[in-house]
Image (cartoon, grey):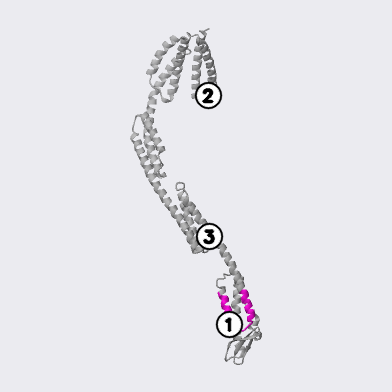
Amino acid sequence: MVPAPPAYSSDLDEAAKFSRVTDDGHVFVIVEGEEFPVGQYPDATPAEALAYFVRKHDDVVSQLLLLEQRVAAHAPSTDMNKTLDHLQQLVTERIMVGDLVALQTRLDAARQEVAERQKAERKTQEENRARELAAREAIVVEAEELAAQDPATVQWKQGSNRMNELFELWKTAQKNGPRLGRSTEDGLWKRFRGARTTFDRHRRAFFSRLDADNSEAKRVKEDLISRAEALSGSTDWGQTAGEYRRLMDEWKASKRASRKDDDALWARFRAAQDVFFNARSQANEELDQEFEENLTVKEKILAEARALLPIKDLAAAKKAFEPIRDRWEAAGKVPRSAMQRMEGGMRTVEDALRGAEDEKWRRSNPETKARSNSMLTQLEDTIAELETELETARASGDDRRIKKAEEALSARRAWFETLQESAQDFE
């Protein structure tokens, strides 16, 4: 609701101070003591003629008051100067009655306030434009950084999503943000579009190479699978196992295909190996079952051989050992799990016999006494170490370690006794 104009504007007595009306309806306005014709209102009383032109003054005052209120409310000043120019023209034409000097003063003050308001708006616009320019520049710079990355190191899914987000930010800023000027916006858009184009070109090239690499990797691995499948029925366990190891080395050295393809290819490759190794395991289990009987025989033979220790009569021991060795060879293979233990046990007896022979040969050499004493000292140290190892094995409760330590200690003690007897021959 527009407030009522000042009281003098509607008070004819007050308006009479700024006017003169003739009997024939001519109205004059007085401005700083000088009369100016306003117009004629015929066929009316002087009061009616005056009231007509006072209402025109009131209308201008009302429009000016509305403008002053808009300025005070910080409304956009877009058309305020146009309104002021229109009101100024009416005041200048003096086609109204009222205090035109006061009205002009208010017009001048209003124009000054509008100018200040426009200055503030320009400052705000410049600040907004600067912020918008910085925001657009940040979008462009980030897009250029994405485009400048090494295609081999880019996380393409995340990168593509981010580039799309930047494009949406650009469109939103262009639609809703302040204008930056055609040349500025065109320059920034050209840079942004160029970055997107470069990024897309790198992405297409990367995935094209990736597809090519994937195809080549699949071809290589398909060949390895074919070779693995061709070997899967072989019963030449040793040589074929070696071939599979070489195929595995080639597989590890080959390039990866896509995850989905690589997983499927590996499953096929592994399946071909499993056919062979499962068959080998089954065959070994059958052999181990057969070799268990041989193991029982060899356990008894090994016990006979160990009974020869310590060697007191070398000739008798050698004569007794020959048939033992023959029966050992004739007994055949034992399960792989027992092979090392059994061969080690027999080798201990053989080493003791060989050591006894060496000592007998050395007895004819005057220098052997000193060497014999040295060997005895070394064996004493070794026996002490083995005794410690046996105690440790017993403390661990590991039957395998205990048995191995007992066998090693028994062999060294037998050898020590043999050497000790030999050394006594030199005294």
In this rendering, the answer to whether 214 lies above or below 231 is below
- Cβ–Cβ under 8 Å for marks 2 and 3: no
Prevailing secondary structure class for the magenta stretch in the rendered image: helix
Q: Residues within 10 Å of mark 2 (few under 14, many from 20)?
A: some
| Crowding at mark 1 (Cα within 10 Å: few <14, some 14-19, many 20+) | few
Cα separation, mark 3 vs mark 1, equals: 47 Å
In the picture of the structure, the residue carrying the numbered disc 3 is: 133
Q: Along the polypeptide, which appears first: circle 2 or circle 3?
A: 3
Q: Position of residue 198 (x, y in %)?
A: 44, 53
Tell me how far mark 2 sits from mark 3, CA to CA.
Answer: 79 Å
Mark 3 residue type: Leu
Q: Is residue 159 above or below residue 108?
A: above
Residue 138: image x %, image y %? 52, 56
Q: To which residue does mark 2 refer? A: 393
Numbered range of the magenta stretch: 82-110
Nearer-N-terminus badge (3/1)? 1
Locate residue 29: give its quadrant. bottom right
Q: Which residue is mark 1?
A: 93
